[in-house]
Structure formats: structure tokens, C-alpha cells
Image (tube, rainbow, N blue to C red):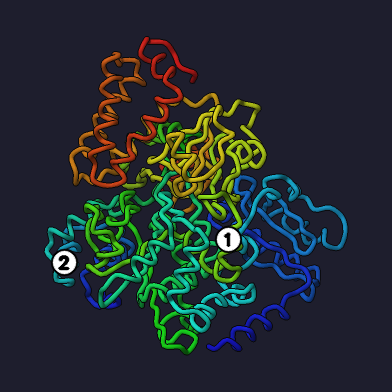
Amino acid sequence: MRRYNYRAHALIEVLHSVQESFGYLDEHALKFVAASLHIPPSRVYGVSTFYNFFSLKPQGAHTCVVCLGTACYVKGGDKVLAAIETAARIKRGETTPDKQLSLLTARCIGACAIAPAVVYDGVVAGHQTAAQAVERVKGVLSHGA
Amino acid sequence: MVHEDLIAIAGKERSARKPVRVRCCMAAGCLSSRSADIKTALEKAVKDGGMTERVEVCRVGCMGLCGQGPLVGVEPEGLLYEHVTPENASSIVTALNGGAAEPRRGDLKHPFFARQLPVVLARSGRMDPERIEEYIASGGYSALHRVLFEMQPGEVVEAIARSGLRGRGGAGYPTGLKWATVAKSSGQHRYVVCNGDEGDPGAFMDRSVLESDPHAVLEGMAIAGRAVGADQGFIYVRAEYPLAISRLQVAIRQAKQHGLLGSAIFESSFNFNLDVRIGAGAFVCGEETALMASIEGRRGQPRPRPPFPAEQGLWGYPTLINNVETFANIAPIINRGPGWYASLGTEKSKGTKVFSLTGKIRNTGLIEVPMGITIREIVEELGGGAPDGAMVKAVQTGGPSGGCVPAAHFDTPVDYESLVKLGSIMGSGGMVVMDEHTNMVELARFYMQFCMEESCGKCIPCRVGTVEMYKLLARLVEHEATPSDLEQLEELCDLVKNTSLCGLGQTAPNPVLSTLRYFRNEYLALLQGGTSSR
């Protein structure tokens, strides 16, 4: 926050930093940010729930983001997602009970030329098939590492 | 930094070049296919072969044919290798001494390359985006110098107006006119904002430009700052583009170190600071008033216009907002003259346009073509048609705000007006190709779901209308809809289009309207309980 001179308009930048450090935004962090930037907690909460990128819940040890952009959709990204949902027994936006895997979706990650794309732990994988994706996800779930 | 320093850097950079340059694509697409390992393998092969005197391996931005990536190019031989792997990369280096390399050779004479006219992408894939020296060596920042020392701000605005450049974000507002409005407005401060919130799914032009040639955008923004009298700029980039953000930050730092951004640019009295603002995953932030709210650290909700940002923008001050591609066009226009730019393209749409060609098409990737080229040329000649010999059915342009152009209208030239006439829009440049296996009603539902989830919820027509339209489309897809449902859908489209606050709601019905216009039979087939083509 010091980097941004505690200016209120740096709220989104600050929330990015918090999420990067702690993985998600908890109530304590939101209150702390509000107090430090001298803005009402309601506004901090409003901003952090408005943007899809911020998460108020802890994430699993691994993340799997399925791109649902148009190019990925036309090439079957929806089927890849459905296959992962079945394999991991969670819906999109959820985390497995053992906190190993969070399944997320993205609007478009701009990797349209290699559609359908899935991002495993921040690494983009292109030309994914349902079978490939399920294998990756099952690997994470069974090893638990 | 004075002009002589610029020339010295360029000269030093050029004389340090080695005769053979092996270019390794390190934009996001190819990086995801291990192009970083490929670069390491290439460097090792050069070292092992004792060719370090003669051969250099360099990191470059997007080379365009992303679908065949990872790509490696060799200059001056003019070779392009496709689907390179870290394992077979070394054979490219050994082939320099004769023999053939293992990876497949690409055909640079193919229309995909031959029919392009790169202006914005001229440097993309040819230089290291993280080295300002290479940008300067290719003539970079000379346009900014010219604007500061040889032109009055009014002349710059005049030059942009004469070039005929129109906003590349989609709406096509004349750029010169926008600059003139901001320059004329009164206020203590003015701001320049670059809209890099490329939200349309299926579009990645701006990402590629930012990743491959970030200095071109910075130079364009600094020129704009001089022309309209602003000393602070913001670049708003989506959080989904981490590589573009880091390359921009590197570029800004380098430009500041060289005295090309910040205080006293080129030791003149002109100051211009730039900050990167990172989005947080909200499509509506591509709308200019919502984007400004987001830069100010608030929820990205749009407000009614007027007042337009050119009069009352960031913190109430006049603000110039242009898209990434628009700014990337500025330096070439100053360097080569507005007359040259105006000679490209059609009567009302000048210059070139970058498109990302994706979907059911053989050659997916990034292309830059002159305005006025027909959709057929893009899809069939550059794109090579649909894979597996399927029939191309339609092309979707403009993302969730746009519409479909059916194959019957493929001879339409690509310009702002012609696409609007067909019920679509130019948009920011995403082109998603659909073949005969794509169900158009499901596609319309896909887009409506997108708009429904991305609606910011401020105005009722958009918040409620998109949900209702989605429900109706879902009933259609499930074969449960009645003819009166279809009627209601059309009424809702009209209502949401005409009463929503911002562009998101006003254009949300477009994918439905255009598919209804050209593929009504698919809707009707679902009504009668029949099966449509999928």
C-alpha cells in the first residue's frame, strides 16, 4: 500500500497484491485494506465482489481454469469442462472437499489459436481433449500433492 | 536523451547484429507449448556447434500463425518452422550448415502471409519485446521526437484527422475528432487512457500487440499526450494477460530510464507519466465510463453519456480513451505521413485492421489486412477454409456485441459500414469461424449467458432482460419453446437494445438478432421439435 501512497484509487491494485500473497481475500484483510486506505468497508466489499478475479473463499492447493471463450466453445471447451466436473465431482467455481483442487472458468484467456485451452496451476495447456483434461485432474486428486 | 543518442543507440544495436538470427516466438500462445525450453535448446545448439560468432537466438513476439506453434524463424534465410519441440529444435541450428531440419517447414508464400499488410504488426515477431534498443533500432521513438521538435500539437491532431484513422476498439469513431475534442476542452489536467481490456471472447489482438511490441503503444500514447496536452496516462490491461502486463511494465521502466517517458522527455519541457492499471475480470470494464470507474478504484459500472469522457473523464477531467491498436497506429502515421495511411483501405475505412482468426478454420492466428478485403478472402485464402473439408457456415465478428455474417454474404468488404449493414459490427477484431456442425441457437445462448453473467446490474433492461432472453433461448435449445416464446424473444431483443444504459446491454441482443435474421430455420426447427444440424 505504501507503493501506492495509500491513495483510495489504488484499491484494485492493493486487492490484487493481497490476493497474490494470501491466495484469497478474507474479512480481516478487507477490513485492514479499508482502514489503511481510509475508505468505507462497504466499498471494499463492493469492489471485491464485483470483479470475478477476486475470491473471498480459500482456494484448493491446485487450480484448474477452463477457458470458455468463443473459440474454445466452438471447439468443445464446454465438453472439457463437463468431463472435469464429472471426474472431480465438483461444479465450476467449487473446490474439492479435500481442498486439493479448485475448478474455475475464464471468459477468455486469449489463447484462442490453441483452443480449447485449460490453465493448470497457472500454466496454459492448449488443444485439450476431455480425456486429457480428466487425466490431469485425476492425477492431482489421487496423488494429493 | 537527445536525438543524437537515439541515433547512436540504433547504430550500435544494428552493428551488434549477427549475420544469422534465429527467432523464437515467445508470446503467450507459443510459450504455453514450451517455447522457453525451445529457446534454451537453440542456444545450446549454437554454443555446442561453435557458431556463437555468426548466429544469435532471440526472443520475439507473435509471428501470427499461432495454431501451428511453437514457431521458429530463421533470418536472412527466411525460413519458418512449425510445431517445433525442445527435442528437435537443435536440428534447426545444425541445418544452418546444410541438410534439413526435423520440424516441418512453413510456407511463407502462402496467402496467410502474402496477403497481409502489416503496419501495427510490422515489428511483431521480428524483435525482442523486452529490449528497447531493438525498438529504437527499427526507427522507434523517432516519431515522438518529431512531434516534440518539429510539430505543433495542433498539427499532430490535424495529421491524425487527415489519416482517416478510426477507433479500433470497434465503434469506429474518428480518432482525429476525438483528439481535437479533448485538446479543446478546458480543465487543469487532462488524461490519456489506453483501453487494453480486451474482453471479447475469441479476440487476442491487443494481447499480442502488447506482448510483441509494447513500445509502439507507449510511443503512441506519449504522442497523444503531447497532442492533447496531457501529462499522465493509464494503460488498463486485463488481469488475464499476465505476460502482457509484465512486458508493459518492463517497457515503461526502460523508456523512463532512457528519458523517453517521465519528466523532460528528449530534454524538452514535455512531461508524460504512464501507469499500468490491472483489471480484475469484468467484461463491462471495456466500456469507457466503466473503465474509468475501475481506474479510480471503484466498481466498474458505466454511467450515462453525455458528458463524454473527452469532456469529463477521469476524476472529472477531460480524458482521451483509445484502444491498444489505435495507439499502435499513431507512430507509423507520423513517420510515413497521413497521406500514406489514407491511401490504404476504403473510402470511409482507412488503413489496416488486425484480426484474430479462430474457430473452425485451418490457419488460426493473428492477421493484419487492409480494410476493404472481403470476408471470403480472409476465410478461404488466408484462413484456408474449415478443417476436414467441412463447409464454413458463418463468421462471427465483434464478440458478444456483434453478429454473424453468413457464408452467402462472404463477398462483403470488411469496413465499418458494410458490417453494420449486415447486422454485425467490426468490433475489436475477433473473427470466430463456424462450420456446418455449429448450432446457431446454442451459439446465441452461449453469448446470452455471457452477457447475463457480465451485466453489471445497474440498469434494469440489461439486468433482467438478459436473464429472460437466456431462459427463452435455453427453452429453445431444450425443444420446449412455443411460437409465442420466439415472439417474446424478439420483442425483448428490441426492448433491451433500445433502453439499456451502456453498450453491453444495447448490443447484447445482437447475436440473437443476427442469427434470427440468417438462420431462422434453425430456430423454427427447434420449435417444431425437430433436430437442427448438430
Q: Chain of mark 2?
A: A
Q: Where is B27 relative to A134, above or below?
A: below
- B415 sits to left or right of B502: right
* In the foreground, A18 or B327: B327
Q: Amino acid at mark 1?
A: Tyr
The residue lying at 27 percent from left, 59 percent from top is B308
Residue pointed to by mark 2:
A34
Q: Where is B343 relative to A133, above or below?
A: below
Residue pointed to by mark 1:
B341
Q: Residue B221 appears at what percent x and percent y?
A: 44, 70
How would you rate the neighbour count of disc 2 (Cα within 10 Å): few for under 14, some for 14-19, many for 20 or more? some
Q: Residue A72 appears at what percent x and percent y?
A: 48, 39
How would you rate the neighbour count of disc 1 (Cα within 10 Å): few for under 14, some for 14-19, many for 20 or more? many
Say if residue A142 shows up in the picture: no
Q: Residue A40 appears at what percent x and percent y?
A: 11, 64
The residue lying at 62 percent from left, 61 percent from top is B122
Asked where in the image residue B375 lies, by quadrant, the reply is: top right
- B65 sits to left or right of B250: right
What is the number of callouts on the image?
2
